[in-house]
């Protein structure tokens, strides 16, 4: 395969080569050459003939994103890492070099279905061995979906130290806009080492989660305490985030919101402006208007903001807000009302800051965006279930007072040196290419589904009796949200919506509540399903979906060069890990 760098094949040129029937423009964003917003992307993927190649270097370094110096895990020297972008239908080849001296790593491409490329999903102990220090792992996958997402380390708590970045796949949209302003990555931000914090967190219950000192918008913010502190780490160099271009009256701007926080929920808003929501995760939806959008960790929304025709009352300056929500998880953020950016109109004073105030209509809530508003543009109904399983979320203490979350009484702990996908491949090889029949340890929490193209319903219920919410993410699929609510799930009393229900890859399980999701068994692989709150994932709130196991070995055998690379990655990891100063002390993911 010949690889072309992003610089060698500008995105606009790729679009122009395909614009034979319909041009994507500010007045026709639904168009996409021979395709459109009405094309069923689950069945049709454009052939662009383009492969985009990226090189990512992961380093441990000191940075001051908000003016307070901390150790970070930076990608190409920045937090968040650089934007990875492609055109719908492109192939991506991404080389990740681990320069962290004392830890492995693995990068997950959030929301990417990885059809026929399960080994590139980037989960240590599940789809690969970790990349050892000094080594490089190459990921290859198709941009078969389009919209907004992100990439992040799936190795323990590394994402909380900044090892993440935005991922955009350009395609059509359900509403018009003039300018794509790109990703807006929302993060909570800790000034202490998250691994030291973990030493305490794993021994406390969910009633006392760690408080982040601050939050970042695209890696920037100020830390007000530095003005009053003699702490030498307070550099006082923090700056508010601003877009790289000023708003022009009457123009419409696309913002790609990414919830990448370690914990909790953000509510995003721009003072004095409405948001038109046009996509949830990777799913285009019927547009709706709102004052603010709630994002749990892992969730994304594309929104269009129309600039005011005459912004003179605010001097052309407005606060952009990422408001940390305290209504759930007994959580807080020390700077929850100070995570701010600036929207500046053309001609506004470059030295001035906004004086606008938060609208009263914006209240504290962790609830997902309204269920009845998240209507997928491309209609898909849900068929009757061939498998229905209840997944009960609970917790327990070990004798050493280490706290664990469980799904059906099991807490997940992966084996970094023996990833599930290679275990499945080896079992098939041992059976002469016959059916896979692996017996997995209980702690790996593997749920097997061997049916082909049938519907699976999962009823996920929280049995903890406390107000702790969980943004649940499933790899390898968009799922259908059939029901969501508080209290117990009572079959027959809770109505399941099978008629074009919301589709996405990350949904909130309410504290003491339930969420019912459905997916079709159309993607053979080993797929993680987990809470996206980092502390909860590290405490084992996860399972592995082993889908159509006997078809997985063919994927790996179909790419013998990469299968050999996987073996080399594991050999390097197994050689290095005994010398590591830090051993696995959490779930591993």
Image (cartoon, rainbow, N blue to C red):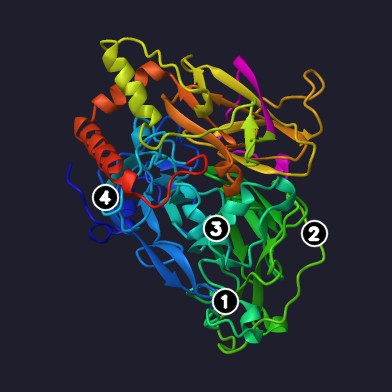
Sequence-wise, which precedes: disc 3 or disc 4?
4
Question: Do the CB atoms of the residues marked 4 and 2 lie less than 8 Å apart?
Answer: no
Sequence-wise, which precedes: disc 3 or disc 1?
3
Q: Can the viewer see residue 195?
A: yes
Q: Tag 3: Cα neighbours inside 10 Å, few (<14), some, or many (≥20)?
A: few
Q: Residue at x 51, y 49 (%)?
A: 173
Is disc 4 placed on a helix, strand or loop?
Answer: strand
Q: Label 1: which residue?
A: 240
Is disc 2 placed on a helix, strand or loop?
Answer: loop
Question: Do the CB atoms of the residues marked 3 and 1 lie less than 8 Å apart?
Answer: no
User: How many marks do you count on the picture?
Assistant: 4
Front residue of this view, candidates 431 and 364: 431
Quadrant in the rendering for residue 304: bottom right
Tell me the distance, in whole angstroms, between the alpha carbons under discs 1 and 2.
Answer: 23 Å
- Label ID, residue 93: none
Q: Residue at x 17, y 46 (%)?
A: 2
State yes or no: residue 372 in magenta.
yes
Q: Tag 2: Cα neighbours inside 10 Å, few (<14), some, or many (≥20)?
A: few
Tell me the distance, in whole angstroms, between the alpha carbons under discs 3 and 4.
Answer: 27 Å
Q: Label 2: which residue?
A: 363
Residue pushed farthest left?
Answer: 2
Quadrant in the rendering for residue 165: bottom left
Relative placement, left or right, of 256 versus 125 is right
Q: Give the label, 3 or 1, closer to the camera.
A: 3
Q: Label 3: which residue?
A: 196
State yes or no: residue 560 in magenta.
no
Tell me the distance, in whole angstroms, between the alpha carbons under discs 3 and 1.
Answer: 28 Å
- The location of residue 287, given as percent across then percent down, is 63, 49
Sequence-wise, which precedes: disc 2 or disc 3?
3
- The location of residue 192, given as percent across then percent down, is 56, 65
Relative placement, left or right, of 376 versus 484 is left
């Amino acid at each position: 395969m010949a690889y072309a760098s992003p610089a060698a094949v500008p995105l606009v040129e790729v679009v122009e080569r395909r614009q034979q029937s319909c041009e994507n423009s500010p007045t026709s964003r639904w168009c996409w050459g021979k395709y459109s917003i009405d094309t069923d992307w689950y069945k049709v993927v454009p052939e662009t003939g383009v492969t985009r190649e990226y090189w990512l270097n992961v380093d441990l370094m000191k940075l001051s994103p908000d003016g307070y110096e901390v150790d970070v895990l930076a990608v190409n020297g920045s937090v968040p890492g650089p934007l990875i972008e492609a055109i719908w239908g492109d192939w991506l080849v991404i080389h990740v070099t681990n320069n962290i001296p004392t830890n492995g790593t693995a990068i997950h491409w959030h929301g990417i279905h990885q059809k026929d490329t399960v080994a590139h999903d980037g989960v240590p102990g599940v789809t690969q061995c970790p990349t050892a220090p000094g080594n490089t792992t190459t990921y290859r996958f198709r941009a078969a979906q389009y919209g907004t997402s992100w990439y992040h380390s799936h190795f323990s708590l590394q994402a909380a130290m900044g090892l993440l970045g935005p991922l955009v796949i350009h395609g059509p949209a359900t509403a018009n806009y003039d300018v794509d302003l790109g990703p807006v990555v929302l993060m909570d931000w800790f000034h202490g080492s998250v691994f030291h914090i973990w030493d305490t967190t794993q021994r406390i219950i969910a009633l006392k989660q760690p408080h982040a000192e601050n939050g970042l918008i695209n890696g920037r913010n100020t830390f007000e305490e530095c003005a009053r502190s003699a702490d030498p780490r307070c550099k006082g160099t923090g700056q508010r985030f601003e877009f790289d271009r000023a708003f022009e009256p009457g123009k419409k701007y696309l913002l790609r919101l990414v919830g990448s926080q370690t914990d909790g929920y953000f509510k995003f808003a721009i003072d004095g402006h409405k948001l038109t929501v046009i996509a949830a995760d990777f799913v285009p939806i019927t547009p709706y208007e709102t004052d603010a959008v709630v994002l749990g960790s892992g969730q994304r929304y594309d929104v269009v903001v129309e600039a005011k025709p005459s912004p003179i009352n605010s001097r052309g300056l407005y606060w952009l807000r990422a408001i940390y929500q305290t209504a759930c998880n007994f959580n807080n953020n020390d700077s929850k009302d100070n995570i701010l950016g600036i929207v500046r109109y053309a001609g506004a004073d470059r030295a001035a800051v906004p004086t606008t105030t938060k609208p009263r209509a914006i209240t504290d809530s962790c609830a997902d965006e309204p269920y009845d508003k998240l209507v997928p543009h491309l209609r898909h109904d849900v068929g009757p279930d061939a498998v229905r399983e209840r997944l009960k979320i609970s917790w327990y203490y070990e004798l050493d007072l280490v706290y664990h979350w469980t799904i059906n009484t099991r807490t997940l702990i992966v084996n970094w040196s023996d990833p599930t996908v290679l275990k499945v491949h080896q079992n098939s090889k041992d059976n002469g290419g016959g059916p896979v029949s692996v017996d997995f340890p209980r702690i790996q929490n593997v749920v097997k589904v061997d049916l082909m193209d049938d519907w699976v319903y999962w009823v996920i219920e929280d049995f903890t009796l406390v107000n702790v919410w969980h943004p649940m993410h499933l790899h390898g699929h968009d799922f259908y949200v059939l029901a969501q609510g508080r209290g117990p799930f009572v079959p027959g009393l809770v109505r399941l919506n099978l008629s074009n229900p919301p589709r996405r890859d990350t949904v909130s399980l309410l504290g003491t509540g339930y969420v019912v999701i459905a997916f079709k068994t159309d993607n053979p692989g080993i797929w993680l399903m987990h809470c996206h709150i980092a502390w909860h994932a590290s405490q084992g709130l996860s399972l592995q979906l082993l889908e159509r196991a006997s078809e997985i070995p063919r994927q790996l055998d179909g790419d013998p060069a990469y299968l050999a690379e996987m073996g080399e990655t594991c050999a390097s990891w197994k050689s290095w890990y005994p010398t590591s100063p830090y051993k696995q002390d959490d779930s591993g993911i």
